Amino acid sequence: MKNRPVVLKLGGELLEGPGTLTAIAKVIKRASAKRPLIVIHGGGREIDAALAQVGIPKRQVDGLRVTDPETLDIVVSVLAGSINTRFVAAINSVGGKAVGLTGGDAGVAPVKKAAPHKATSGDTVDLGMVGTPDKAPAPALLALLCKAGYVPVIACISASKDGKLFNVNADTLAGSLAARVKAKRLVIAGGTAGVLDKRGQTIPRLNSTQIAKLVTSGTANAGMVAKLTACQAALKGGASSVVIVDGRQASRLAKAVALEKTTATSRVVK
């Protein structure tokens, strides 16, 4: 893409309430009028609730969901069904031009089965039907949609070359996609004030050495480990900048996607 896009990953917790959903939809509508915007979303808490309803236990390792076939069915239903459809409708209702996708659509985010995961605890765990990004060029579909003024909204489900479906960690997918499209910025937005130190204070700037210390010391929790790994992958692959931002306030999110400085934000550098 000649006009390099911003890639925005939104934690599912930001999309649950109608008020917050509408506020985020307005941010996306305004931002996409100025620069191509690609959105990836998660939905962990809604998946957890759906699993609990049918009596399937939740299993996670370092923020990665262990996914058996029964769990995968729920994940696909929640992410690609209810959340994605609701989110796309919200953006379009405020005047945006959103299109709902999954990673499996036309080479958006091809994956392969993830290798056994070496956990921070030292254990090695088979994650089951979890995909990890496969090598691929920048997705032509996203370039076409962005050029036409549409906002791709991608649920973190994808498929392998032989057509098998996989659950994909949303942060991992966002980091990989930001690298493939050489994003101007990757914004990872969630329900915390950036990356926090032991005192609960936002760390404004993080390099690889600092990230390693946060992980080995246990200061970075399981979900944050996945985010930090995704940030490093994006930078290594060619994204210009990466920030982890508190997405609970629309004004902060708007500044982050507009490439402006804002509070409650951690910038990740090489």
Image (spheres, rainbow, N blue to C red):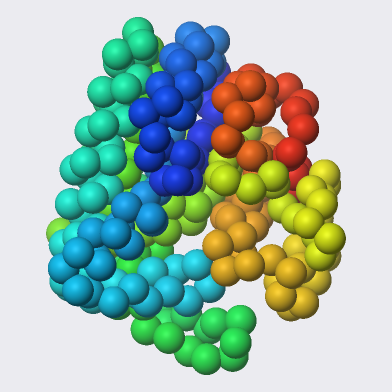
Place of residue 224 in the rendered image (x, y in percent of width and height, measured from the top left): 61, 60
The image quarter containing residue 162 is bottom left
Q: Is residue 177 visible?
A: no
Check the image and report above or below for 248 versus 36.
Answer: below
Which residue shows up at 20% across the image and 64% down it? 53
The residue shown at (30%, 13%) is 93
Q: In the rendered view, tell whether residue 74 sits above or below residue 191.
A: below
Choose top left, top right, bottom left or bottom right for residue 242. Answer: top right
107 relative to 248 in the view: left or right: left
Q: Is residue 246 left or right of residue 20?
A: right
In the current view of this chain or complex, which residue is farthest to the bottom? Answer: 123
Closer to us: 51 or 89: 51
Number of marks in the image?
0
- Is the residue 45 above or below the residue 126 in the image? above
Tell me what residue is drawn at x 38 percent, y 39 percent: 16
Q: Position of residue 118 (x, y in %)?
A: 53, 83
Is residue 45 toward the left or the right of residue 56 in the image? Answer: right
How far across and down, in percent of the image, does residue 254 sit? Answer: 60, 22
- Which residue shows up at 37% across the image and 76% down it? 59
Q: Is residue 246 visible?
A: yes
Above-or-below relation of 16 to 126: above
Q: Judge left or right: residue 229 versus residue 124.
A: right
Please state the horizontal and vertical placement of residue 245, each as a whole percent of the image: 65, 39
